[in-house]
Image (cartoon, rainbow, N blue to C red):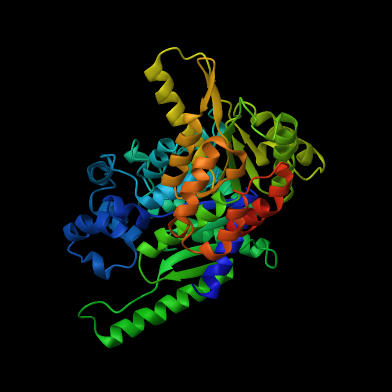
Amino acid sequence: MDRDTEDFLEKYVKELSESNAAVFIGAGLSKASGYVDWAGLMEPVAKALGLDVAKEPDLVALAQYHLNANASNRHQLSQLLVDEFSDLRVPSKNHALLARLPIQTYWTTNYDRLIEKALEDGGRRVDSKYTTEQLALTRRGRDAVVYKMHGDIEHPDRAVLSKDDYERYPDTHGAFVTALSGDLIEKTFLFLGFSFTDPNLDFILSRIRTRFTKHQRQHYCLTRRRTRQQGEKKADFEYALTKQALVTQDLMRFNVKTIFVDEFSHITNLLAVIDSRIRRRTVFISGSAQDYGTWGRPATEAFLSVLARDLIDRNLRIASGFGMGIGAAVVTGAVQQIYSTRNRSIDEQLLLRPFPIGIKDAKARDDTFNRYRSELVGQAGIAIFVMGNKESGGKVVPADGVRAEFELAKAEGIHLIPVGSSGFVAEELWTEVMAGIDSYFPKNAKKVRPLLQSLGITVSDPNELLKPLLGLIDILSKE
């Protein structure tokens, strides 16, 4: 990974963690799901006009030529949109990764609904805006806003397509111009699948540049590096390479830095890295205790409280299902540390979801708990397992919920840290992880092994485990 890419990852992840990031999605991102890009959409239009779409750099002009030739009748263009975009396709891996990230603001010039579908599949409540009137309305409980500045497939007759549409845009969609201008000033954008040939965006970026000459926010664009195509002449390839370099240089006027990838699949890899780095800032604590074993309740609660405090002090977020006998101590330590400074927020650093009780139907309860666990565990990058027992039929038995959370975390590729010394299910899990430590920690098993080994040593005072446990956290949260 080159220096520019690593610098981008570090800075964009920081903006994400501070809720200052946004994304702008272009037509290129939808191609992986089977939709056409702008050139593909305009190909039949160009053919009907006796033109070759491959030779036309101004695709907006093609739509206008069509209207000019058909007395401004939009029917064929609207039908073309319906034919190409009305079928709801499956969002790509890139859409799914973007939907997982802590982004509240999504902008797109696409007419399809792939990003909305990906967000909804991830359990998020989407507020979609594709008309000026919708900007004044707010969907209750929303946690993601999708601004579709060129319209939506549900209203093909109102889609922004032609030169006429673009020329009237400041009058017909002035509120979108204002909203996007504000977001570009306040947030760090990541542009994906976007060619930067859109007149509206160029106009908005230019306005921002003239007003904030020396204080523009840094934005990023992921682009595939131009490679020589099969059968392409050397002169043509060198010309295309020069043009790409000039466009890249020009984007710097707007403080948009281009990050090159060699293959489109590498964009997916980078998004996966971003997702991983964001998730590793969240530590999931799993455990339950009817029996506190040799430690006893006071020592166990004190240990968990200090652990939670130290995690918050490292600016990590804690996620927990408020396990019986465990959750209260975690919350106590976390809240006290959060309140110790005015710069922290409970909502930002503590994700607490007690399991719903009172579901009598066994299947409904199991289905609910499985989904509940999956959504909670899926937000973390590190998982700690403590104790793991419960009462059943008057006896203390292993907590199957802790085992289920371990398997879910394992399937998600989350770093697993069982505190074996605490006994019960956690001890079983520690034995399993130690036996396969090279597969559980393929990148740094050598560093992890002695620290994880320490977590299995029998101690009477659990506070003795804090140093190796936090040492593991420090390694894994920075991997």
Who is closer to the viewer here, 450 or 123? Answer: 450
Who is closer to the viewer here, 13 or 139? Answer: 13
Looking at the image, the residue that sits furthest to the bottom is 235
Residue name at image x 56 percent, y 52 percent: 278
- Expressed as whole percent of the image width and height from the top left, the position of residue 306 reads 74, 42
- Expressed as whole percent of the image width and height from the top left, the position of residue 217 reads 64, 61
- Expressed as whole percent of the image width and height from the top left, the position of residue 17 reads 62, 50
Q: 328 above or below 55?
A: above
The answer to whether residue 304 is visible is yes
Residue name at image x 55 percent, y 29 percent: 389
189 horizontally vs 327: left or right: left
- Expressed as whole percent of the image width and height from the top left, the position of residue 368 reads 44, 24
Q: Hey, which quadrant is residue 56 in on the image?
A: bottom left
Who is closer to the viewer here, 451 or 68? Answer: 451
Who is closer to the viewer here, 107 or 392? Answer: 392
The answer to whether residue 107 is visible is no
Residue name at image x 35 percent, y 79 percent: 240
Quarter of the image with the C terminus in it: bottom right
